[in-house]
Image (tube, grey):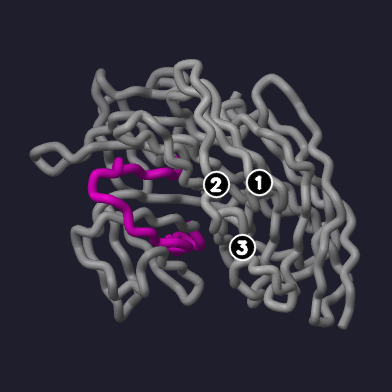
Amino acid sequence: MTQFQPGPVRFLLPLLALCLGLTVAACDTTDSSDSDDATGRLTVLLTDAPANLDSAIVTIRRIDLVPEDGEDGDDDGDEDDESEILRFPVEERPIDLLQLQDGVTTTLADVDVPAGEYEQIRLVLGDEAYVVADGERQDLQVPSGEQSGIKILLPDEVEVENDGDEIELTLDFDVHDSFVLRGNGRYLFKPTVRVQEIQINGDAMDMVSVEGAVTSVDVESGQLVIEDVVFETTGRTEFDDLGSLADLDAGDFVEVEGVVEDGRRIALEVEREDADEERSITARLEQVSPSSVTLLGVTVAVNAETDVDDGDLEDLDIGDRVEVEFVIRSDGSRLATEIDREDADDD
């Protein structure tokens, strides 16, 4: 059995108008395979989507990187169950997610990772979480399962193959979905983190997500169509709250997160949602006109009531990564209610 002693991996955290360095302790891992000696750099960026709160505070105490075929159980204290997982403890401190906007970054960690393919990253939360709404602080309970790590699936291509390979990973800790306002005026903490962008040696992978109604399901071919966007499922597709693709029917409401590979949309994760959730598509713009936008081949109308984040429709360009929230009109067409720019390096 060999021991891997890591060097620095870089984790970056966008923070509005301020750069804060978060100290990283040693990475604990045991590797039971004889891999080659190549090491690469992993950069992780954290950002968030807007929300109507004064502050949204979380703490992160560790980042785990799971290799392909690594054990995927919960952290139950049995080190033999997850011996190949790379663990990077960080200095636990409060982080205001509402400050993680506009593409400002700061270093969270800096370590090397060994050669290999990686299928999952986890954010392990600390015990403290709270929001400030209308000047009032509400302390929140961190779900026990999330303390073992928020699991974020990675595409097949996330691999350190050659010495000096660089992987940059941008995560979106979505405040809107993570802090849910209940009928009694109190907030429920349901941590929601998505992959926003991955760059490998400077080349960006195209990450996409669609939330809405299932159009059709073809179990035999492994195809899932949601809001007229076709996804392919694979053996690595994770079905949250679902046993398999066969458990879905047309009309079910789901969220699909995926990656575009050689023109194919590969589903990484499929999660059942409540029917009253917002419909949305997050991807790069393919067409922009005064009356509509098109992304993933789906055209969504816009009008004077459409809220365009940080500007007007004319400020958007083809290739910009955006989230378009929309409603279905009586004629079956889609109308955008809000368009948010998602690019991590917005000016």
The residue that disc 3 covers is: 120
**Label 1 or label 3, whichever comes before in sequence order:** 3
Q: Which mark is residue 142?
A: 2
**Residue at the (45%, 73%) spot, across then down:** 234
Q: Is residue 1 left or right of residue 278?
A: right
Asked whether disc 2 touches disc 1, contact meaning CB atoms under 8 Å apart, the reply is yes
User: Residue 269, how many percent across, how many down?
Assistant: 45, 61
**Residue at the (55%, 50%) spot, across then down:** 195
Camera-nearest label, 2 or 3: 2
As drawn, 198 above or below 334 = below
Q: Residues within 10 Å of mark 2 (few under 14, many from 20)?
A: many
**Residue at the (66%, 46%) spot, across then down:** 126
Is residue 228 among what the camera can see?
Answer: no
Q: Quadrant of the N terminus?
A: bottom right
User: Residue 310, how many percent across, how many down?
Assistant: 47, 20
Q: Quadrant of the C terminus?
A: top right
**Label 2 or label 3, whichever comes before in sequence order:** 3
Q: Which mark is residue 226?
A: none
Relative depth, front residue between 120 and 28: 28
